Image (spheres, grey):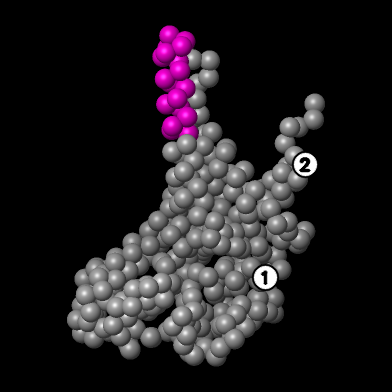
């Protein structure tokens, strides 16, 4: 009997499911987009963003299944005297539905035959890695780490860009409110990702934003190794060049555009905004994590 599913749908699933899956994460404004673009420029890698599969999609699917099961239960009670014909959707069914939907979204554009690794960058996956591992136990995780003070300043500028003008005014109430929020969020993301990495070192790679600024090739080569793709320095250098600040923005690194998503592309910008109080607030909210990580 012919399948009721369209040939295009089946071909997309087959194509996506035969690749090695991976997920890029990191605190907001840690350089996840830069990392994603480098990986996507590698000829054996497809990495797009942001799918929000394990944030929005999984939540909405869970709600839908729960609502559907309640409807079946009500019908069973009211029509079939508590003896339903259908048992409802089980927990393991949730995984069997989520994965094909992800494959459909990730693979719909089609991929060259040489693509071996298929990834999605969604920053907040850092706090969902245990859930991802339960659904896709062989998937790889790439975590980018950046000085939380620069993360906070970059996030403050993002808030400014979307309308919160006081966010980048030092000593304003909004400045400190935003800083507290982003310091806590940075710490939560970093600790969650590193905890997963400690439990699953064979599936995890951590790269440094600051080291990538100096030379991205060694950092990306380590990622390529865990993804099982070509880690040759020449191939990686070409991908890094294609995703460079200059080529993606048309500006020189350090040339600031406060209206752009990729604003400046530098390390140490926090020094332009932090005073002693700012530093104390940041360290309090992040529980001194920067010291543990070696950020002086």
Residue 187 makes an appearance in the image: no
Q: CA distance from mark 2 to mark 1?
A: 29 Å
N-terminal of the two: label 2 or label 1? 2
What span is in magenta? 65-82
Instruction: Indicate yes or no whether the magenta region holds residue 68.
Output: yes
Q: How many marks?
A: 2
Instruction: Say above or below: 4 vs 232.
Output: above
Majority secondary structure in the magenta region: helix
Q: Quadrant of the N terminus?
A: top right
Q: Out of 99 and 219, give the one closest to the viewer.
A: 99
Disc on res. 42: 1
- Quick check: marks 2 and 1 in contact, CB under 8 Å? no
Q: Out of 174 and 163, give the one closest to the viewer.
A: 163
Q: Nearer the viewer, mark 2 or mark 1?
A: 2
Pointer 2 residue: 7
Q: Residue at x 26, y 74 (%)?
A: 174
Q: Residue at x 50, y 21 (%)?
A: 87
Q: Residue at x 42, y 13 (%)?
A: 78
Q: Secondary structure at mark 2?
A: helix
Q: Secondary structure at mark 1?
A: loop
Disc on res. 181: none
Residue 46 is situated, as x and y percent measured from the top left of the image, at: 65, 62
Residue 150 makes an appearance in the image: yes
């Amino acid at each position: 009997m012919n399948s009721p599913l369209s040939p295009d749908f089946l071909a997309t699933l087959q194509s996506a499911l035969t690749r090695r899956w991976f997920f890029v994460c990191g605190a907001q404004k840690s350089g996840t987009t830069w990392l994603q673009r480098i990986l996507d420029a590698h000829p054996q890698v497809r990495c797009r963003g942001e799918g929000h599969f394990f944030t929005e999609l999984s939540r909405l699917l869970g709600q839908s299944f729960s609502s559907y099961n309640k409807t079946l239960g009500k019908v069973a009670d009211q029509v079939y005297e508590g003896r339903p014909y259908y048992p409802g959707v089980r927990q393991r069914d949730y995984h069997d539905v989520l994965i094909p939907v992800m494959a459909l979204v990730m693979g719909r554009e089609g991929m060259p035959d040489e693509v071996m690794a298929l990834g999605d960058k969604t920053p907040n996956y850092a706090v969902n890695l245990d859930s991802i591992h339960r659904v896709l136990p062989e998937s790889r995780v790439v975590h980018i780490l950046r000085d939380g003070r620069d993360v906070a300043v970059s996030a403050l500028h993002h808030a400014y860009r979307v309308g919160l003008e006081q966010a980048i005014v030092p000593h304003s109430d909004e400045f400190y409110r935003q800083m507290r929020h982003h310091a806590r969020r940075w710490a939560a993301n970093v600790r969650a990702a590193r905890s997963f990495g400690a439990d699953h070192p064979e599936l995890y790679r951590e790269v440094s934003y600051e080291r990538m600024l100096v030379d991205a090739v060694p950092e990306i080569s380590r990622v390529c190794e865990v993804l099982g793709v070509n880690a040759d320095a020449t191939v990686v250098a070409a991908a890094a060049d294609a995703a460079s600040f200059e080529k993606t923005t048309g500006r020189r690194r350090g040339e600031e555009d406060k209206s752009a998503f990729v604003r400046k592309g530098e390390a140490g910008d926090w020094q332009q905004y932090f005073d002693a109080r700012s530093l104390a607030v940041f360290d309090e909210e992040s529980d001194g994590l920067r010291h543990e990580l070696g950020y002086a």
